[in-house]
Amino acid sequence: MAASLRSARPHRDFLDIRDFTRDETLALFALAERMRTGTYRGTPMQGRALAMLFMKASTRTRVSFEVGAIQLGGSAHFLSPRDVQLGRGEPIADTARVLARYVHGIMIRTFAHADLVELAEHADVPVINGLTDLSHPCQVLADVLTIRQHLGADDPHPVAWIGDGNNMANAWIEAAALLGFPLRLACPDGFDPDATYLARAQGEGADVQLVRDPREAVRDARVVTTDVWASMGQEDEQLVRARAFAGYTVDEQLMAAAADDAIFLHCLPAHRGEEVTASVIDGPQSRVWDEAENRLHIQKAIMAVLIGDEPLLDD
Ligand code: CP
Ligand code: NVA
């Protein structure tokens, strides 16, 4: 990267929820809140560029990072496998080294989490996880920001995850362990979340439980959330999964079994009639549009801190 624009601080990555401490995460929420309400007007990415590597499709992640970088005074550069040599077999390490000579941060959405880690190891600039098969931390921070917006920031509101133990479920487990809210996951046998994440959270005493019955998971929950049954890269399993997830649709009956004031979240894109009914996602308890908007605010906070040198806590 151009030396004159090089940050004075050692660079940090955001590869997973635990890359920020609890206090740092709370400070990020406060900064994102200032982004959302418009009281933050800084442009800490002035003259700085974000490369966005997308090995999978995206609507929200792409547009929110791109617009966010521009609002912070910087630029964003969309790179798909069709456009860059990574798609023709150039090594990740070489791509990382080269991009870091041009840009000040890299966001990547890819398949194997190991590819994200390898990119971060070889890039001399901050790397941000825009989703891997293992984890989607930006989304879950946006989701917790949405919970704080609608239910308040003081209580550890119980969350119920219904459906696939996928990248979103894994990031929820990490967030529950870090931030201290109860999490019940109802997943069909054979579709559990990552065993390492679950064991680590439970080993630390986090209130995270895996159950099979969706009704058990939503009891007393103030947040009910789900995701597609076949994630990107699993399209061939769609039919098998639709059978395995029968009974795991979030419908009005399931919402009625949660707390009276429970809200519904979904990272989107959603398949109405599969993991959620139209009556729920388009109904009065749904907060999915604010949730999508909050991607912009939380990612601006993350970029301002990691790429723009915005202070976080005492640094
Ligand atoms: N929720 C989410 O990450 O959406 P996109 O796949 O559209 O980026
Ligand atoms: N679990 C989904 C999330 C999409 C934002 C997927 O990986 O496709």
Image: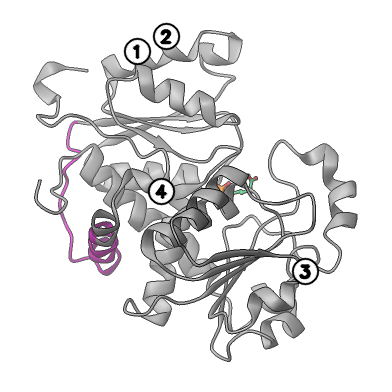
Amino acid type indicated by mark 1? Arg
Residues shaded magenta: 27-47
Tell me residue 142's x, y (percent): 42, 59
How far apart are labels 1 and 3 at the CA level?
Answer: 44 Å
Query: Pointers 1 and 3 in contact (CB under 8 A)?
Result: no
Q: Position of residue 183 (x, y in %)?
A: 54, 67
Q: Earlier in the sequence, mark 1 or mark 3?
A: 1
Q: Is mark 2 within 8 Å of ligand 1?
A: no
What distance separates the C-alpha of mark 2 from that of mark 1? 5 Å
Mark yes or no: residue 192 visible: yes
Q: Which secondary structure lies at badge 2?
A: helix
Residues at marks 4 and 2, CA–CA distance in whole angstroms: 26 Å
Q: Which mark is residue 17?
A: 4
Which badge, 4 or 2, is on the more N-terminal residue?
4
Residue behind mark 2: 94
**Element marked by disc 4:** helix
- Give the mark nearest the N terminus, 3 or 2: 2
Residues at circles 2 and 1 in contact by the CB criterion of under 8 Å: yes
